[in-house]
Image (cartoon, rainbow, N blue to C red):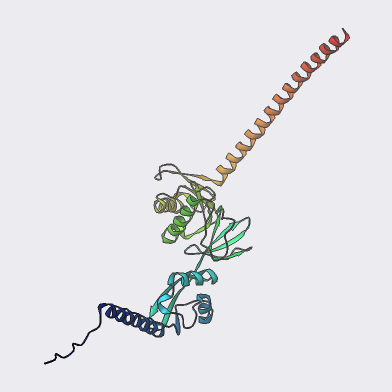
Amino acid sequence: MQSKPEKKGLSPKDKGIITIIAFVIVVLLMLAAITFMFRVDTIIVKGSSSYTAEQIKDAAQIQPGENLLAVDTAAVSARIQKKLFNVEDVKVSRALLHSVVLEVEPAKPLANFITPKGVYIISEKGKVMLITNKARAGLYNVVGTDPCPALLTGDRFTSNDERKDKVIHELLAGIQASDTLVAKNITLIDVQSFSNVVVTYNSKIDVALGTINDLEYKFEYASNLISGSVGDKEGIIKFQTDPSRASYIDKSGLDYNDQVYKENIESYRAETSVSEEEDGEEGDDEEEDSEDSGNTVNME
């Protein structure tokens, strides 16, 4: 009897090729599904803002049909904050299969940073909302901030000294958090020297804080002095190295000190001038002697 011919199966090589083709097909189908299923077709704007929803969407620069999973949420947030100056922060998230949610936090003006180059309107979180030539009413007035030359509207405020940046940030935060008499009635802040900060209470009393260490304690101490013995008289409260010690000098004392200082300066200048004149006369005499000596030499 003749045996039936055996059926030959797929070779290992053929099986490998089929497996690879099947894998590629699956991947392509998955990519097509992802592209189709996760396309951005809706942008939802939440939160309050002085801008319209359309203005915020335009600033986001998310293209219709863009892959939802490929949206760079951090970049979208940064674009909106940079372009829209009255926006403080934006939280960007993905929702469902086709939506991007933009949750907008409006910028709240806090301070006028008054500089020779103009007035920088600064938000509560340190954003430059506007650069103008006029201070805005109802905000803290701050001098001595020394802004970086390249600073533009929409940037986070930075000075030419990182140490000053830290002092400004902590000082403003401390003032806002304080419930003391001084903190609630500050009319001017001077940070020209970050190690000798001065705030002015009610346009009358300068409070020389020194460093901003123990800030709340210093506010309380100065407030107690004003509520007690100092009152509402013009003058200066100056803290010593030890924050538990401070001295107060009223306006008459300041004027007296200023007058004494001016008199000392004038006296010093007068004495210096007389001394220079005497030195000049002696120099002239020596020069005459030298000239006579020279003539004599020439004559010989």
Identified at 77% across, 16% down, the residue is: 286
Looking at the rendered image, the quarter that the N terminus falls into is bottom left
Query: Which residue appears farthest toward the right when viewing the image?
Result: 299
Query: Which residue appears farthest toward the front when viewing the image?
Result: 1
* Closer-to-camera residue (171/38): 38
Return the x and y of residue 36 as percentages of the image width and height.
41, 85
Query: Which residue appears farthest toward the top when viewing the image?
Result: 300
Looking at the rendered image, the quarter that the C terminus falls into is top right
Q: Is residue 176 above or below residue 250?
A: below
- Direction from residue 241 to residue 146 in the image, left or right: right
Identified at 78% across, 20% down, the residue is: 284
Q: Is residue 255 above or below residue 86?
A: above
* Closer-to-camera residue (134/16): 16
Return the x and y of residue 53 as percentages of the image width and height.
50, 81
Considering the whole magenta stretch, tell me its main secondary structure. loop
- Direction from residue 21 to residue 143 in the image, left or right: right
Q: Is residue 272 above or below residue 215?
A: above
Q: Quadrant of residue 72?
A: bottom left
Please give the range of residues in magenta: 148-153
Q: Quadrant of residue 132?
A: bottom right
* Closer-to-camera residue (31/74): 31
Return the x and y of residue 117 as percentages of the image width and height.
63, 57
